[in-house]
Image (tube, rainbow, N blue to C red):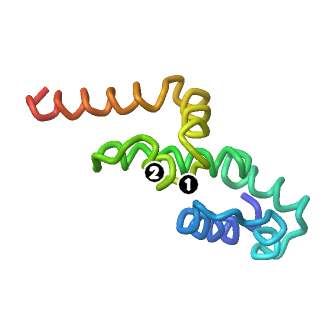
């Protein structure tokens, strides 16, 4: 692992807490004491994915948690999870989970019902 792994992990924690905010890559690089070009390479090396992919995954996981724990509409979930709007959530969900947000919510509901029945 790279010598900057600790800094990258701290940035991931920071991003998790500020997921809806648009933070310039140059600012993240400065937080890690890296040049912008170094930051992108180092981030991918440490995390195993690009910054964009990481942010999409964090937002999608947050959306899934909200689908499990709330009765919010998908539009509200998209906004609360840091997506621009529902079509953005739909695009990312289709690409990363190979299903629509509604299908994902339905799958979560089915899993919940299966657990309630003891299966």
Identify the secondary structure beneath mark 2: helix
Q: Which tag, 2 or 1, sits closer to the chain's start?
A: 2
Compared with 76, 29 (above or below) is below
What label sits on residue 37 in the rendered view?
none
Residue 37 x, y percent position in the rendering:
91, 59
Quick check: 58 left or right of 49? left
Judged from this view, the residue extending furthest toward the left is: 117
Q: How many marks?
A: 2
Quick check: 92 left or right of 81? right
Residue 68 x, y percent position in the rendering:
30, 44
Hey, which quadrant is residue 94 in on the image?
Answer: top right
Residue 93 x, y percent position in the rendering:
54, 33
Question: Few, some or many C-alpha atoms within 10 Å of disc 1 (few <14, some 14-19, many ≥20)?
Answer: many
Mark 2 or 1, which is nearer the eye? Answer: 1
Residue drawn at (46%, 32%) of the image: 101
Hey, which quadrant is residue 117 in on the image?
Answer: top left
Task: Find out whether the residues at labels 2 and 1 contact each other: C-beta distance under 8 Å.
Answer: yes
Residue drawn at (45%, 51%) of the image: 62
**Mark 2–mark 1 distance (CA, rounded to whole Å):** 9 Å
Quadrant where the N terminus is found in the figure: bottom right
Residue 83 x, y percent position in the rendering:
58, 49
Compared with 41, 88 (above or below) is above
Quick check: 57 left or right of 52? left
Question: Few, some or many C-alpha atoms within 10 Å of disc 2 (few <14, some 14-19, many ≥20)?
Answer: some
Compared with 15, 52 (above or below) is above
| Residue for badge 2 | 62
| Residue for badge 1 | 82
Residue drawn at (34%, 47%) of the image: 72
Between residues 14 and 45, which one lies in front from this camera angle? 14
Identify the secondary structure beneath mark 1: loop
């Amino acid at each position: 692992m790279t010598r900057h792994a600790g800094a990258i992990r701290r940035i991931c924690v920071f991003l998790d807490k500020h997921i809806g905010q648009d933070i310039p890559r140059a600012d993240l690089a400065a937080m890690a004491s890296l040049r912008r070009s170094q930051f992108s390479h180092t981030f991918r090396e440490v995390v195993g994915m690009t910054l964009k992919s990481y942010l999409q995954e964090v937002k999608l996981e947050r959306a899934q948690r909200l689908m499990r724990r709330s009765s919010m509409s998908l539009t509200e979930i998209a906004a609360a999870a840091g997506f621009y709007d529902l079509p953005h959530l739909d695009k990312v969900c289709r690409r990363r989970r190979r299903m629509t947000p509604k299908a994902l919510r339905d799958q979560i509901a089915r899993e919940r019902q299966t657990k309630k029945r003891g299966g």
